[in-house]
């Protein structure tokens, strides 16, 4: 079996690394975890010009090889390989922003000194040109001693040339240069010689990093650490001073190289357009108004644009199910297929257009450079509740899913702020809540338009997202009061320049997110739908393959009636109670559960929305009245109905204590809040 070669993609944050990864791999990507840690990684397969298959590994962005946060630790460990949970890498591809070349070259030169095969890829050449920067690629390659390739990820230019260079480097014998980029040996000569003799490392710079990080390396024995402790103390090694000296040496050498290969117009002669835009978008008043307007437009689009394909999918899927129902013989297997499997899946595929539109717009905003401004703009607000601007990105990414959002808190160095962010992130409305919000809002809010263009249902959906966000802030302020950890934090962020977003990149994200939503949610829904159909069709004493019973006398009906007294004060009937229970596997299961229950009970040809709109209680009142609908919206906004989120909180905090308290606290808040809003709305409707 031919081994597929591995190429790591590394670079500074906002250097275009992920865009290049998407361009190289397209939809051939998979997501997993680095061995031994909870940090997410993306791996994508691609073919080079000679049809050789390679795997690209997209590593977390970092400014240097001296890690300060968990994600930077992962990049460090993977690149050094033989120190920890490293990948067996064949080549390192360093992505550098050509418009900020000096800063990016610091990290590039550190990678070069690892004495591994390296290719440097310059991105954002168009922005460099607008800044008046001209780069001689050949001279830069000679100065650095490694191949340098320029690409335009926005237009896809230079990719063929890049693949050709990767092909050459992978299939030729790599002989590391004898000279380091800087004289690393002079920084700690005695200690480097000692480590070389002990560990057999070939590069001085690897020895230097080993001396700085050996305490965090898992495969080193306690005895080895004690020996190194003694040697470090004897040689008076100060890693902070060594790192500072190294940085100064690197920048001095980088300056000399740039003088020979880079021509830059004085900043006074050319004003960057991004600075003018930021005067408006980061203004304390105008900026916040624009921020709210952006989110308003997002959710208007989610309703307005998605309405048409959703109606087509709903009608088409219902017609397909009715066709099968009329065509297939009536037996156990037909009922299982139609009332069990298809009824559950049909309640999910209808929401694909909304998922695609939501994440497509978010991708465009991120690609344009605006998402980073949101962190900067909200930093002051975050600090008032015990967080900082770095907490904003996990909270925003929780709109997709709380699991990777909680994992994204690894970029927060402050332990207290990281813990608070983990605990409040599930309040953000994730994509799993979107199907629940959509169908309930469509049942209780008329499909009217304010001023002819503003969807009232879209406004309510926006309100649900704001409810989650401000609840998260309130919970953070409460936790900030009770968690007594003194740890200073500084929020530093480089704002990327504004760029025209790429539609092809957004399309890849839309397809990936919808695929993940359907597959991940579909697996859970399929299993639950089959089990629920069995429980809804049969009861005690019935023949499981022949004799069906009424829904009220089924196992599901019996269980539902048992829990109904607990949920009745919230305005829910026993069918909603069953859906609440199944939703703890995944929130979006609510729609599939209702589809299965109503299909078994009614067996009509209406769509799910039409069936739910007509549903009545035993007293003749509508099940989905305004008080009940609002109560359900609030319950799903606050309750932690996601086993995956609980599992990831446990992994990030190292204990079941916090996720259990989180689950109970959010559950109690959801129940009491739903009870209050149901009582209030019942007084008016």
Image: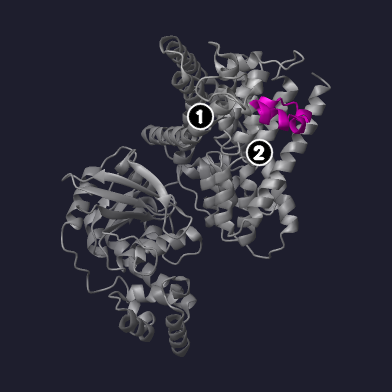
In this orientation, which residue lies closer to the viewer: 162 or 56? 56
> Given the current orientation, which residue lies at the most extreme bottom position?
234
Locate residue 602: give its quadrant: top right
* Residue 468 numbered tag: 2
* Rendered view: 344 above or below 506: above
Residue drawn at point x = 72 percent, y = 19 percent: 625
* Residue 530 numbered tag: 1
Locate residue 682: give its quadrant: top right
* 445 left or right of 222 in image: right
Residue 34 appears at what percent x and percent y?
A: 42, 56
Q: Is residue 466 magenta?
A: no
Viewer can see residue 136? no
Residue drawn at point x = 50 percent, y = 16 percent: 311
Residue drawn at point x = 61 percent, y = 26 percent: 539
Q: Is residue 564 magenta?
A: yes
* 14 left or right of 490 in image: left
Residue 8 appears at what percent x and percent y?
A: 33, 55
Residue 388 appears at what percent x and percent y?
A: 62, 53
Q: Element at badge 2? A: helix
User: For the magenta stretch, what is the residue range?
Assistant: 557-576
């Amino acid at each position: 079996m031919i081994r597929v070669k591995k190429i790591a993609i590394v670079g500074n944050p906002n250097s275009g690394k992920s865009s290049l990864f998407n361009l190289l791999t397209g939809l051939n990507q998979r997501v997993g975890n680095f061995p031994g840690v909870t940090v997410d990684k993306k791996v994508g397969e691609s073919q080079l010009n000679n049809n050789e298959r390679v795997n690209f590994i997209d590593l977390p962005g970092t400014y240097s090889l001296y890690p300060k946060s968990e994600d930077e630790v992962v990049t460090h460990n993977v690149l050094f390989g033989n120190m920890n949970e490293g990948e067996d890498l064949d080549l390192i591809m360093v992505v550098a922003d050509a418009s900020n070349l000096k800063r990016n070259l610091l990290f590039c030169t550190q990678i070069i000194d690892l004495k591994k095969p390296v290719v440097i890829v310059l991105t954002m050449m168009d922005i460099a040109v607008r800044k008046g920067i001209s780069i001689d690629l050949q001279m830069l390659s000679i100065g650095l001693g490694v191949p340098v390739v320029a690409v335009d990820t926005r237009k896809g230019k230079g990719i063929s040339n890049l693949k050709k260079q990767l092909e050459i480097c992978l299939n030729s014998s790599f002989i590391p240069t004898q000279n380091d980029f800087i004289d690393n040996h002079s920084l700690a000569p005695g200690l480097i010689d000692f480590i070389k003799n002990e560990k057999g490392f070939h590069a001085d710079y690897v020895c230097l990093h080993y001396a700085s990080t050996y305490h965090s390396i898992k495969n080193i024995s306690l005895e080895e650490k004690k020996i190194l402790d003694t040697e470090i103390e004897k040689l008076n090694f100060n890693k902070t001073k060594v790192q500072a000296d190294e940085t100064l040496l690197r920048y001095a050498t980088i300056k000399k190289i740039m003088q020979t290969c880079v021509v830059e117009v004085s900043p006074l002669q050319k004003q960057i357009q991004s600075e003018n835009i930021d005067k408006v978008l980061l203004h304390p008043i105008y900026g916040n108004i624009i921020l709210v307007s952006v989110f308003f437009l997002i959710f208007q689009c989610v309703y307005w644009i998605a309405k048409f394909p959703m109606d087509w999918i709903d009608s088409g899927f219902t017609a397909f199910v009715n066709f099968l129902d009329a065509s297939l013989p009536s037996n156990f297997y037909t009922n299982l297929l139609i009332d069990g499997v298809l009824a559950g899946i049909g309640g999910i595929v209808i929401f694909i257009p909304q998922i695609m539109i939501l994440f497509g717009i978010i991708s465009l905003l991120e690609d344009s450079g605006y998402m980073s401004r949101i962190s900067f703009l909200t930093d002051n607000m975050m600090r008032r509740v015990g967080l900082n601007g770095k907490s904003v990105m996990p909270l925003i990414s929780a709109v997709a899913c709380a699991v990777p959002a909680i994992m994204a808190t690894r970029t927060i160095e402050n332990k207290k702020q990281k813990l608070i962010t983990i605990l409040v992130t599930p309040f953000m409305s994730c994509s799993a809540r979107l199907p629940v919000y959509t169908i309930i809002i469509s049942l209780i809010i008329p499909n009217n338009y304010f001023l002819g263009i503003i969807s009232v249902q879209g406004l309510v959906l926006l309100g649900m997202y704001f409810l989650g966000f401000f609840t998260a802030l309130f919970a953070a302020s409460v936790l900030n009061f009770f968690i007594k950890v003194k740890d200073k934090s500084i929020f530093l962020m480089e704002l990327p320049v504004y760029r025209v977003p790429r539609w092809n990149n957004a399309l890849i994200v839309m397809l990936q997110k919808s695929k993940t939503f359907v597959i991940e949610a579909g697996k859970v829904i399929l299993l639950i739908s089959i089990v629920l159909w069995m429980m809804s069709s049969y009861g005690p004493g019935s023949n499981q393959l022949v004799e069906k019973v009424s829904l009220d006398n089924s196992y599901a009906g019996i269980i539902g009636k048992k829990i109904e007294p607990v949920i009745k004060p919230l305005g829910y009937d026993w069918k909603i109670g069953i859906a609440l229970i199944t939703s703890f596997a995944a929130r979006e299961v609510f729609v599939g559960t209702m589809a299965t229950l109503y299909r078994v009970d009614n067996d009509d040809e209406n769509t799910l929305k039409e069936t739910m709109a007509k549903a009545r209680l035993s007293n003749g009142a509508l099940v989905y009245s305004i008080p009940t609908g609002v109560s359900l919206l609030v319950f799903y906004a606050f309750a932690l109905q996601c086993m995956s989120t609980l599992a990831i909180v446990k992994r990030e905090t190292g204990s079941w204590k916090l996720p259990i308290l989180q689950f109970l606290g959010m559950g109690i808040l959801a129940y009491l809040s739903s009870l209050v809003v149901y009582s209030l709305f019942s007084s008016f409707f």
